[in-house]
Image (cartoon, rainbow, N blue to C red):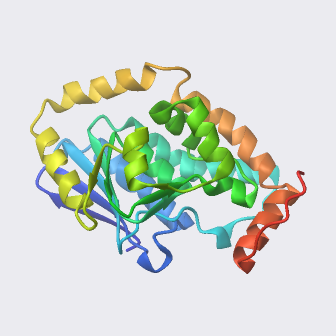
Amino acid sequence: MTIELTRDGAIAIVTLNRPERKNALTWEMRQDLQKYFTELRFDDEVRAIVVTGAGGAFCSGADVGNMGGRDLRKSRQMLQSGSHAYMRVLHNIEKPVIAAVEGVAVGIGMSIAMACDMMVVGKSARFAQVFQRIGLAPDGGGIWLLVRRIGTPLAKELVYSGRFVGAEEAVKLGIANHMTEDGSALDKALELARQFATGPTYALGLSKKLFNLADGPSFEDYLEMESMVQPQLNNTVDHKEGVAAFKEKRKPNFVGR
């Protein structure tokens, strides 16, 4: 199973389990994430959720090998039924959700971690919004989530540059909440989950809805706008060059169109 769902009492643990590719997401993994997040959202026996990755990595993003070859309409449909579908469910779960991040969390992987209510990171954790390297804008609500964690000016810097942020800087900026020794992020996340699982789950869930409405356009409105942007970029010269350069392990030669 490339997505594993396990239970520890009132806590559910969702594990991205494709360690040979640093848990890069396939289409099947996206469908499973939507299924499991939906199941957990309505399971009254589950009162807190932890999301993590196997093999010392959280998620290296989408599998670039599966990108390209779709027209504008099909690209929009794939975005809405793929990352938007499971990110909507994750964002709207009315229970505490904690990300336990070891190793890389880049692209959509970083967005998944930020969509959780809190984040615990190992010392070697590294984050990046790497979409510009393949001629795309962030998807999965990445900009919406990043702006709400660190503010617009810093978010622009990270998106435009695509640079990596280490664990210590991530905590300092407000991307993550806690830093632990490597290999201990899951233990700390479970500790927090156990604490929250004994709380007033319904009150915490409705507090979460209020937080989601507290600042600017809704996540739903943002994803709708995103679904108009990313499909256009999927058909640009720069995106095709970015994907080719990634596969060929060379620097891309972008031409601005």
> In which quarter of the view is residue 167 placed?
bottom left
Q: Nearer the viewer, residue 41 or 167?
A: 167
In the image, taking residue 60 as reference, residue 167 lies left or right, namely left
Q: Is residue 90 visible?
A: no
Residue at 72% across / 47% down in the picture?
Answer: 230
Asked if residue 53 is positioned above or below residue 116 in the image, the reply reads below
- In the image, 162: left or right of 5? right
Q: State the residue in front, 191 or 121.
A: 121
Question: Where residue 128 sits: x, y (%)?
Answer: 55, 55
Please tell me which residue is depicted at 78% across the width and 72% down the height of the picture: 244
Establish if 239 lies above or below 191: below
The quarter of the rendered structure image containing the N terminus is bottom left
Residue 81 appears in the figure:
yes
Residue 47, compared with residue 251, is above or below; it is above
Q: Quadrant of residue 53?
A: bottom left
Instruction: Provide residue 49's location: percent of width, then percent of height.
Output: 26, 49
Q: Count numbered badges in the picture.
A: 0
Residue in the foreground of this view, choosing between 112 and 254: 254
Q: In the drawing, does residue 71 fall left or right of residue 29?
A: right
Q: Quadrant of residue 181?
A: bottom left
> Residue 51: x, y in percent?
33, 55
State left or right for residue 7 relative to residue 3. left
* Residue 56: % across, % down: 36, 71
